[in-house]
Amino acid sequence: MKSVYETRFARVGEAASHYQTCRIDSIPAAINWCLECMGSYFDERLDQEEFLIATLDTKHYVRRVVRITRGTLDASLVHPREVFRPAIVDCAAAILLIHNHPSGDPTPSRQDRQITDRLKTCGETLGIQVIDHIVVGCGRAVSLAEC
């Protein structure tokens, strides 16, 4: 089980070295990583949505995972300013967006698609690639890049 560290940016998991062996170089790799490394974290959070990012280096190894926001049962307010702040601090080359659906159905909503498009556009402006957005629910994960 992973711990959440409350800092200026809430860290999810152990120290950054824990993630150094995780490379997100494909959609299946992103999905597998989310299920393996983040699945138990989300299993304990069935009462509200949480939106996280994984910051990635230039070779797409995960540097750290940061919780951006906690929402309600079916929504999470996400603003680009909060999403990209930890990525800029980490000098990230890319980020992976991750959030859960407490209902257990990981099917992306219209709002999920809209925020993904908005964050991709912002990332292009900043030079930080948004490689995918993974929605997790009931032991399953869906990639918005695949849908």
Image (spheres, helix red, strand yellow):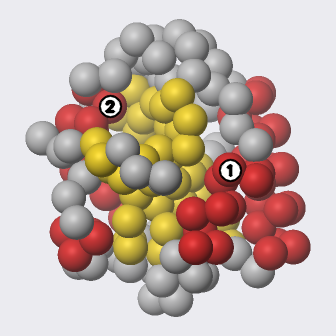
Tag 1 secondary structure:
helix
**Quadrant in which the C terminus is drawn:** top right
Q: Quick one: 88 or 59, which is closer to the camera? A: 88
Q: Residue at x 12, y 41 (%)?
A: 1
Amino acid type of disc 1? Glu
Q: Name the outermost residue toward the bottom.
A: 58
Residue bearing the label numbered 1 = 82
Which numbered disc, 1 or 2, marks the residue closer to the eye? 1
The answer to whether residue 25 is above or below residue 135 is below
Q: Quick one: 96 or 48, which is closer to the camera? A: 48
**Other-residue count near label 2 (Cα within 10 Å), few / some / many at <14 / 14–19 / ≥20:** many
Q: Name the outermost residue toward the front.
A: 8
- Residue 109 appears in the rendering: yes
Residue bearing the label numbered 2 = 42
Q: Badges 1 and 2: C-beta atoms under 8 Å apart?
A: no
**Other-residue count near label 1 (Cα within 10 Å), few / some / many at <14 / 14–19 / ≥20:** few
Q: Quick one: 132 or 57, which is closer to the camera? A: 57
Relative horizontal placement of residue 52, taking residue 121 as reference (left or right): left
